[in-house]
Amino acid sequence: MSERKYTKDHEWVLIEGDVATVGISEHAQEQLGDIVFIELPNAGAEFAQGAQAATVESVKAASEIYAPISGSVVEVNEALVDEPALANSDALGKGWFFKVKIGKPDELGELMDEAAYQKLVDSLD
Amino acid sequence: MADHQSDLKLTPLHALHTALGGKMVPFAGYAMPVQYPMGILKEHEHARRQAGLFDVSHMGQVRLSGDGGVTGAAAALERLVPVDVLGLAAGRQRYALFTSEAGGILDDLMITNAGDHLFVVVNAACKAQDLAHLQQHLASDCTITPLEDRALLALQGPQAAAVMGRIAPAATQLVFMSAAAIEIGGADCFVTRSGYTGEDGFEISIPAGKAEDVARLLLAEPEVAPIGLGARDSLRLEAGLCLYGHDIDISTTPVEGALVWALSKARRQDGPRPGGYPGAEVILRQLADGAPRRRVGIKPEGRAPVREGAELTDGTGRVIGQVTSGGYGPTVGGPVAMGYVESEFAKPGTALAAVVRGKPHPVAVVKLPFVPLNYYRG
């Protein structure tokens, strides 16, 4: 069974077995505006939780994406290279960024569930 | 006027921006719309294909009248700008620069001969400083009147003239960089055919109390959509136009800033009125001998935007310049930038690298603008 969790930095993590797919939330893509370039990590790259893992360039500015959990990158979304706007139009689906092999399962407990994240977003508006 | 939550000033169109869903941000002390629900990308494309309406009421509008009429004001203003103001015919507009004693740029501005006075438009962020500068140097023979009770709208894009043709037909008689007093919807407006997008278009000075009426009249036309500061920036960048405080400032001279075209022949060494403005010695010397660095267009390879502040390096990795404006150019369909390089690297086609997040990205020096300029010259 898969479950989507969120970070306070507006990334989402979808956990399937020992692999987590990472992307940005609807709130994040709205705030960023039109996304024109995404610098993805290389497959095989290892990140500690909180390390800078990717960069999103919108028409407004460059924003860093931090690794929501520790782990090694097993796959990146090549479709974003040619069509970065997928992260706007389908942030929770086709706009995923990369997949990591979960390094420290304990860290998953620190992430927010959908309801807790929605509360955070509502508090920002 | 001040916002309750902050000390930001509001333009006469503030209520309209809010009603239109504008996302308001602080800019030069004003609450200004950075975008509307359409979004920066689509707003940019709309202004390139249709017509965009911009609120530029934060800019400073100033009326200069001289003791000797418009000629007196023109003669006085020539003491502060390297530009032929005396030769500016009634109804004509010219780009100018306030220069510093060291030859730097204090601000860039538009000067229009409005017949019996000069109409001057300066940058919002420099407004107070410019007024003090004018007072200090021109008060002895000029009356300087800040037009604080007037809004300024820009209507820009290939359909701007068709729109004006329905609302203010007289405006369509204007050519690029000319001006006329024209009544629009019962408001006494002053219209120039100019702008900051590279497209044909108009800037309309309106009494503040009538500004929303005129804006709504324009927005009711099917081609017109409101455009925020975000798209204003990408439009002007593609058009190769400088943003004061970024691409030009007190540390850059007009020659370094590639604004030699703005230095009027009449005010050059071999002209009838050479020099006679602050920093003339430096500027005229650089005009003759060249400057150590120059503003150029920068085209990054690939898709990664190169932004303001990125260092530019040569083949050996030596830093030879810096990006002053950069981002994504929606019409170009990729990243665009401009910046300063040491003059020996200023030739179009020169291969350089821009350092982005610590990594060199290949870029090329290119001729500006990035898009064709579509001005209406009659």
Image: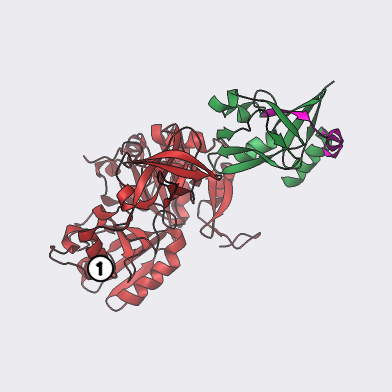
- Residue B120: percent from the left, percent from the top? 33, 61
Q: Secondary structure at mark 1?
A: helix
Can residue B148 be seen here? The reply is no
- Of residues B240 and B337, which is closer to you in this image? B337
Can residue B219 be seen here? The reply is yes
Q: Amino acid at mark 1?
A: Ala
| Quadrant assignment, res B39 | top right
> With respect to residue B256, does B241 lie above or below?
above
Residue A67 left/right relative to B169? right
Chain containing mark 1: B
Per the rendered image, the range of residues in magenta is A98-113
Q: Is residue A104 magenta?
A: yes
Chain B color in figure: red
Instruction: Name the outermost residue toward the front.
Output: B316
> With respect to residue B304, does B8 lie above or below?
below
* Category of crowding for the residue at label 1, using alpha-carbon neighbours closer than 10 angstroms: few (below 14), some (14–19), many (at least 20): many
Residue denoted by label 1: B280
Question: So how many labels did they put on this image?
Answer: 1
Chain A color in figure: green
- Residue A83: percent from the left, percent from the top? 55, 26
